[in-house]
Image (cartoon, rainbow, N blue to C red):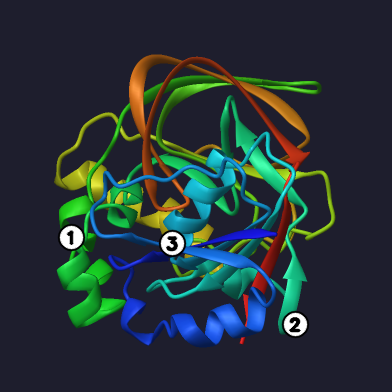
Amino acid sequence: MNCLLVINTLSGNASKVREEKLIEKYAEGCAVTVKYIRDREDTYTVDGVDRLIVCGGDGTLNHALNICRDKELDIYYLPFGTFNETAKGMQGSGVCSLAKMGRIKNVDFAYVAAAGSFTDIGQSPSAKLKRRFKIFAYFSKVLASYKVHRIPAKIECDTFSLQDTYTLVMFSNAKRCFGFRFNRLHRDNSDDLQLLLIKAPKKDNLWGRICMFFPFFRAFFMGFGKEHRGKRITFVSIKNATLTLANETPFCVDGELKRLVGELPVSKQAHKARIFLIKE
């Protein structure tokens, strides 16, 4: 059996990885190859690999999910990132199975795919900042990200259709996102994703940012225990949807930057690989 151990040295807690211990515990009897990610552009292949062990943050897991989408192998994810939202959103401890991923067109995600206000925080801190300041590296970017976005978007589902200009478009597959435990509708074994939309103020000025504060406070600090359809906020469960974007839009997908445009089918699907989250 061939095993590939991937260690993302850019992740916030990469210094805590002990590869000999991991190999002994999760790759006993395997022929092991170790790959170190030292640059954001580094990649790897899984041809001929039976077991993949990935050590890093949510973005490290996201890359593994997408590179292994059509592969039937075992993925073991050990969270050594700064936020580790996927790991924190799972119940219990030990080994947990991540069976169903969100998917936005051809991009899989473990916990979130979002565009608009504050979403660039997930990609902006450098590896040096994350290693030195941990979670505070993200907080330092909050004020710079506090601005109104104008994303013209149409969302079509089986039972409703929405079209407007939004400052936040978010598909959630977890209880937590960006450090907030806001999504109480999430169920690990459900086929549902949650959709959060916050309408954009007319202008990105002081008044627009003041108006934007209250919907964000309602959504993330108070959270949702049931569906909500209001003047500025929509929060609903969906099984299948089509998101149409007229313009190329940067999305934060599990902390990774993806630029999306056009008609994008969104759903929750089983992954061909068997995915195990190791919570130690």
Closer to us: mark 1 or mark 3? 1
For label 1, the residue is 143
Front in this rendered view, residue 233 or 69: 69
Q: Amino acid at mark 1?
A: Leu
Residue at horizontal 78 percent and vertical 35 percent from the top: 239
Q: Position of residue 72 (x, y in %)?
A: 74, 43
Q: CA distance from mark 1 to mark 3?
A: 15 Å
Residue 154 placed where, x, y %? 54, 18
Q: Which mark is residue 92?
A: 2
Sequence order check, earlier mark of 1 and 3: 1
Report helix, strand or loop for mark 1. Answer: helix
| Residue 266 at x, y percent in the picture | 65, 29
Residue 128 at x, y = what percent?
A: 16, 70
Q: Amino acid at mark 3?
A: Phe
Mark 3 falls on what kind of element?
helix
Q: Name the foreground residue: 21 vs 146.
A: 21
Q: Say which residue appears at 27% left-offset and 44% top-offset.
A: 41
